[in-house]
Amino acid sequence: MSGPESWIALAAAIALDAYLGASLGAGAGRWHPKALIGRTLAWSEARLNRPHRSARDRRLRGALALAAAVIAAVVAGAALAGLARAAPIVWVPLALLACALIDLRTEHEDARALAAALASGDGAAAHARLARLSARDPAALDAYGVARAGIEGVLARFASGWLGPVAAWAALGPAGLLGYWVVAVAGERLGGRAQRLADFGAASRAAARGLATVTDRLAGLVLVAGAAPSAGADAAAAWRTLRGQRAAWTVAAAAGALGLALGGPRRYPARTVQAPWIGAGRARAGADDILGALALVRAGALVSFALVVLAAAASAA
């Protein structure tokens, strides 16, 4: 990105998110940027995904729909950035847009409430809070499993809902942010498990998996860096655990840093996923471990914020 204004807008968006959380987008409802992206993708799917067409044709149409949506988002973002360079006041609404599309505070509020419910032994409240952090079936989990699922939900939302968008803006400005969310939302809306999306959503699933791999690796490295200044976190163990994984770097870094065993078999309402355990620590996680994961995520976010501020200062020099 050229010029310090874009970096400053990103730093302002991060600070606003820390203070306001999702309240900035509260009330936007159907006009929230992600809702608009979702409706646009649903419209294209309804018109292009015809069951009488061949599987090859549906796959091609799905790929073209995704490409068109990404190109439109990137062009729109680049146009907004160009307008902001000509009229710097435009960076203000762009910072607000970025704040609406990154979210760390809301996840912290949900996770703290989950930790409080577990600490008080309120299973019903814990299950209700877990539903805001994870798609896991709480009825199939004991208290330790609820805590682990909550931690993994915090880590997943940090990687995809906060760090991914921040990194996308850092790389390409508003164009990167909008393009990121088109791919992410397409993975959810067009890449679902419904039979009608098996072919049409193939490109969206592949693109979302690729994006998730990049954000997972980036988040894992950021959490290793964040573990260094965090009390009670072991940065060396985080790095060792991460190095032993071909995937799930975010979970591996947190498991090593916090001395936990995460992952393992996961049961969802419609299916069970057999997966290995990650980390050599305790599987018996509790409320304090959720708070430890939040502290680690905050440290990683502070490291990222510091890098954004340094980039702003360097570009202004």
Image (cartoon, rainbow, N blue to C red):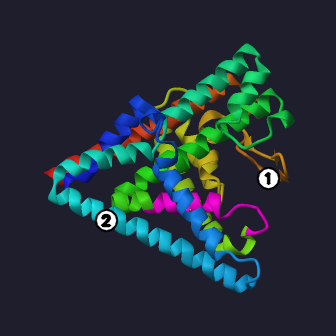
Which residue of the protein is positioned furthest toward the left in this rendering? 317
The vertical placement of 102 against 203, above or below, is: above
| Left or right: 286 as drawn, with respect to 74 | right
Q: Which amino acid does label 1 sit on?
A: Ala
- Residue 241 place in picture, x, y as percent: 63, 48
> Label 2 belongs to which residue?
78
Image quadrant for the N terminus?
Answer: bottom left
Q: What number is the disc on residue 148? A: none
Viewer-proximal residue, 125 or 90?
A: 90
> Is label 2 in a helix, a strand or a loop?
helix
Q: Which amino acid does label 2 sit on?
A: Ala
Q: Bin the neighbour count of mark 1 within 10 Å (Cα to Cα): few under 14, some 14-19, many 20 and up.
A: few
The stretch in magenta equals 179-196
Q: Residue at x 59, y 33 (%)?
A: 293
> Is label 1 in a helix, a strand or a loop?
loop
- Asked which quadrant contains residue 42, the reply is bottom right
- Residue 78 place in picture, x, y as percent: 31, 65
Q: Is residue 158 magenta?
A: no
Secondary structure character of the magenta stretch overall:
helix
Q: Which residue is drawn at 78% across and 29% down?
A: 144
> Label 1 belongs to which residue?
275
Q: Residue at x 51, y 74 (%)?
A: 67
- Asked which quadrant contains residue 132, the reply is top right
| Distance in Å between CA atoms under marks 2 and 1 | 41 Å
Q: Residue at x 70, y 17 (%)?
A: 119
